[in-house]
Amino acid sequence: MVDSWGREINYMRISVTDRCNLRCLYCMPEEGIEGKLNHQGILSLEELAYLTRIAARVGIKKVRLTGGEPLVRRNIEKLIEYIAEIPEIDDIALTTNGIKFKPMADRLKKAGLKRVNFSLDSLQPEKFRYITRGGDIRPVKEGIWEALELGLNPVKINTVVIKGFNDDEIIDFASLAYDYPLHIRFIEFMPVGDLLFWHEDKLIKSREIKEKIEKKFPLTVPDKITGNGPAKYFKIEGGQGSIGFISPMSNHFCAACNRIRLTADGKLRGCLYSKEEVDLWEALKKGASDEELILLFLETINNKPVRHRMDAGWGRENERKMYQIGG
Ligand SMILES: Nc1nc2c(ncn2[C@@H]2O[C@H](COP(=O)(O)OP(=O)(O)OP(=O)(O)O)[C@@H](O)[C@H]2O)c(=O)[nH]1
Ligand SMILES: C[S@@+](CC[C@H](N)C(=O)[O-])C[C@H]1O[C@@H](n2cnc3c(N)ncnc32)[C@H](O)[C@@H]1O
Ligand code: SF4
Ligand code: SF4
């Protein structure tokens, strides 16, 4: 389905929960959000799958499970199984902090998971503990090796670059892409969520990160890496993986936007930034027909804004946080 700005919308990100087993400084308050969405407040796995079937009828072909932390949602593999049965969907991926991944990996793959993106902002145990407010890096690293072992491909690592925190690790991360078939993506820090940790001085633009990497590793012809997102990829000469840049701040990619978002509480969003939402939960409760649900999807796609306005701030626009909308 093409939106009012001529963009083909074929990608749905599903935030399966707003809960998380970490408390990243830039994402969640220390006390977490337990209780905000109780079990009556979120869609069942069957309802999420049902809505994904409807989404497929308006052109969605790619699905990503995110959150909050998607692997804390009970029986998440069941949802993957349901989605894998939808003939139009040809890509089911996961964005995770990796803490719970290893013991679940085999089940997730058998259910139909094609690939996984891990979020990892430091390779050093103490710094990881600091940014996640207490997380243990070991299971995350084990999860990444397990994903490679199982042949989930490509395996990507998302690293939000924060000045004064992890900019000294850029080369260490890049080296991973040289040594292993890992795709390391450096993400510009965005003023999203409740701005717990955000400050404009902490933003490092992709160009600066790339220049730093190029002093050590020559980056060559852009590679085609499987993906539905906005990352721009480069190959390290002689290396096994790739380096990607996600630049929402310095070079926003909204003109090529292909996505909508479904939240755990059944709201459909056209944009990460815009607060406009359509209430599918309410429609489901009232017994809406498939045709009525399709109309709600079409309304969301038609009303997708042309671009974000993060330069104008987040707080005034948005009450919902990244972990609720599905970062
Ligand atoms: N501005 C903006 N940033 C986004 C959006 N979606 C994701 N991001 C950012 O991009 C990062 C990477 O997202 P992922 O969850 O790995 O998904 P993806 O990049 O679409 O994944 P691939 O299909 O592998 O390309 C997230 O951590 C966010 O910081 C979006 O719609 N708008
Ligand atoms: C909100 S998390 C949800 C999925 C899962 N819990 C994880 O961490 O991968 C998704 C991604 O959003 C990113 N993210 C959250 N806040 C961000 C911000 N202010 N700027 C850039 N990326 C952000 C995280 O680093 C993570 O890679
Ligand atoms: S970025 Fe992901 S892992 Fe970190 S607090 Fe947010 S939802 Fe949890
Ligand atoms: S900010 Fe909105 S329009 Fe821009 S890429 Fe993200 S979802 Fe699409």
Image (cartoon, rainbow, N blue to C red):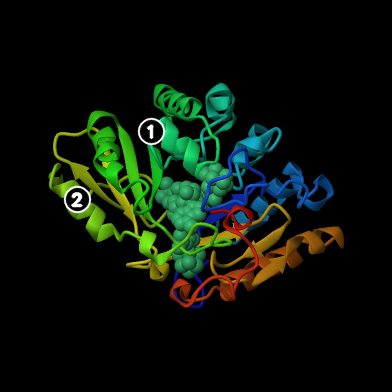
* Nearer to us in this view, 209 or 54: 209
Residue 182: percent from left, percent from top: 32, 35
Between the residue at mark 1 and the residue at mark 2, the CA separation in whole angstroms equals 20 Å
Task: Name the side, left or right, on which 168 lies relative to 292.
Answer: left
The disc at residue 247 is none
Three-letter amino acid code of the residue under disc 2: Lys
Sequence order check: which comes first, mark 1 or mark 2?
A: 1
Residue at point 54% right, 68% down?
273
Residue 302: percent from left, percent from top: 57, 75
* Nearer to us in this view, 254 or 50: 254
Q: Is mark 1 within 8 Å of ligand 2?
A: no
- Badge 1, how many Cα within 10 Å: few under 14, some, many 20+? few
The disc at residue 212 is 2
Three-letter amino acid code of the residue under disc 1: Gln
According to the image, label 1 marks what residue? 124
Residue 43: percent from left, percent from top: 76, 50
Residue at point 12% right, 47% down?
215
Residue at point 37% right, 44% down?
226
Residue 226 visible: yes
